[in-house]
Image (spheres, grey):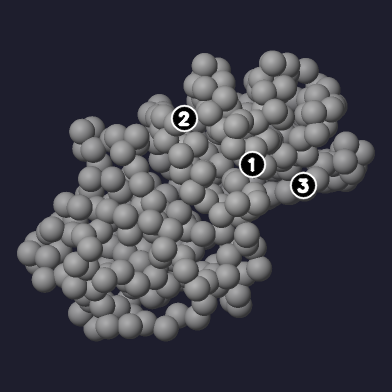
Amino acid sequence: MIGHITLLRPRFGHGVSSDAMTPLVFAILKARTPRDIAVHMIDERVEPFVPVATDLVAMTVETFTAARAYEVAAYYRAKGVPVVMGGHHPSVVPDEALMHCDAVVIGDAEGVWERLLADAAASQLARLYEQRPEDRNIADISFDRSIFAGRRYVPVSLVQVGRGCRFACDFCSIHAFYGTRREQRPPEAVAAEIRDLPPRRLIFFVDDNLYWRRDRFVALLEAIKPLRRRWSCQISIDVARDEELLDLMAEAGCSLALIGFESLEAKNLKQMRKNWNGVAGTYDEVVARLHGRGIMIYGTFVFGYDHDCADSFGQAAEFADRENLAIANFNPLTPMPGTGLY
């Protein structure tokens, strides 16, 4: 029997994070767990690790939290508690993860979670679980955010419209996780969810790229525009070549867009399979179009490709300063498992 489950998000580093956002996957798992099973959550980013008696532990694991995840898993398994791992890292290196846990979920949880719980209740937990095609109905997704009560996260409401990305950049792990698969929820379902979220709180669309197809993006913007909510998103730079789309984004409440500029060097963009970054014109032109509509920009950059040099750091910083980017994120090139770069 399974009467109690612990959902656990491992920490990276030490101390309480001041910018932690709600782990939305746990709201999905909570919504798909039978009501007769108690669900407890530990998010080490915002609270200390204080274990309680439990029948099963489920962790979401990223590459940079894997070491800590394996450490915590060893603690539970020593007490005879089975541990399940999901998320990006176990999905792309399941053999490694299985050395530290009892079962790995590859990919998304819908449908898989229900089967896993039934197997665990029967003491027949399999080693690997993977979503079946018939389980891939993102329109059926729901979130039970009560799991986050009593914890201090940044005052931003996370919303997921879809999964996957149209592009397969050399360094990016999204394509490693989803491949060519892309899907989105119906716009009316997204709008209905937003209506029930706390008012006056910024919405952040967690999609890796909110711009999938023009018709679907327009339908989404039209659905959320009447809500008069402010929101931010991650989006590919090619949206900036469509003036009508930019107008509609602003009208629908977009206040900030995260754009991966990545590099100011064209040869680097080609090497990272992101030479399409120039389709909307120069970076200066892109920034001007968004700023002209009152949309702030969160620009990301990566350093470490073959055509970077000592001057590349200062040039990127000067660009961010000159263009008045609201936020600029400078990242060292990291070969994440499953990527072309790796």
* Label 3 to label 1: alpha-carbon separation: 24 Å
User: Where does residue 189 sit, x and y in percent of width and height?
Assistant: 42, 35
Q: Are marks 3 and 2 in contact (CB under 8 Å)?
A: no
Residue 263 vs 213, above or below: the answer is below
Q: Secondary structure at mark 3?
A: strand
Q: Disc 1 marks which residue?
A: 229
Sequence order check: which comes first, mark 3 or mark 1? 1
Q: Disc 2 marks which residue?
A: 187
Q: Residue at x 50, y 80 (%)?
A: 48
User: Where does residue 334 sit, x and y in percent of width and height?
Assistant: 59, 49
Q: Residue at x 16, y 52 (%)?
A: 115
Which residue type carries mark 1?
A: Arg
Residue 338 vs 52, above or below: the answer is above
Q: Residue at x 57, y 70 (%)?
A: 152
Q: Residue at x 69, y 49 (%)?
A: 331
Which residue type carries mark 3?
A: Ala
